[in-house]
Amino acid sequence: MAFLKRWKTKWELKSLTFDELFNVIVEVVTKQLDDVEKEDVTLGANLVIDYEADSVDVVAMLLYLEDMFKNASQTTRTVVPTDKLGQIGLVEDIFDIIYEVLLGIEEKMETFVKIEPDFDALEKRQKIGELYPNAKA
């Protein structure tokens, strides 16, 4: 099953603009991948080839996004699906997943409430996947 990438033809998300959501993705990618600079993050970048990410990094990024949007829904906990984990290759794929999650939340709202990313939650989160976070390579 391929990613929908509906946002490429019509932006339907009301809470965040394309640039705002992309900024969230940039923050998440650079939080997990120390060697990646914000200005180097592009939608077309291959996580493995361009950024040397592994599956733990990808899972961590999805968990960060889940944490940042945990309060997006007033009725349920925000859950970022991991069933497409093996298909994630590009930054664009992560963007698509969170776009679809947020769009789904908005569509279920009886009264629209703007969804805000919680950057503080990301900042407080310890980087995932480090066995010895204080060790210097």
Image (tube, grey):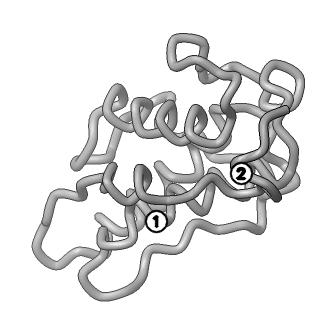
The residue pinned by badge 2 equals: 133
CA distance for labels 1 and 2:
20 Å
Q: Residue furthest bottom?
A: 75
Q: Quadrant of the N terminus?
A: bottom right
Q: Is residue 122 above or below residue 71?
A: above
Q: Residue sitting at 24 percent across and 81 percent down?
A: 74
Position in image of residue 46 (x %, y %): 79, 25
Q: Viewed as shown, does residue 112 lie left or right of 19?
A: left
**Viewer-nearest of discs 1 and 2:** 2
Query: In which image quadrant can residue 21 be found?
Result: top left
Q: Earlier in the sequence, mark 1 or mark 2?
A: 1
Position in image of residue 26 (x %, y %): 50, 31
Q: Secondary structure at mark 2?
A: loop
Give, as a three-letter code, the residue at label 1.
Answer: Asp
The residue pinned by badge 1 equals: 67
Q: Viewed as shown, does residue 12 lie left or right of 101?
A: left
Can you tell which mark lies on residue 52? none
Q: Is residue 33 above or below residue 39?
A: below
Q: Is residue 78 above or below residue 51?
A: below
Q: Secondary structure at mark 1?
A: helix
Q: Nearer the viewer, residue 137 or 109?
A: 137
Give, as a three-letter code, the residue at label 2.
Answer: Pro
Q: Residue sitting at 74 percent across and 49 percent down?
A: 58
Q: Is residue 51 above or below residue 1?
A: above
Q: Nearer the viewer, residue 93 or 50?
A: 50
Position in image of residue 38 (x %, y %): 51, 19
Q: Residue sitting at 31 percent across and 47 percent down?
A: 13
Q: Residues within 10 Å of mark 1 (few under 14, many from 20)?
A: many
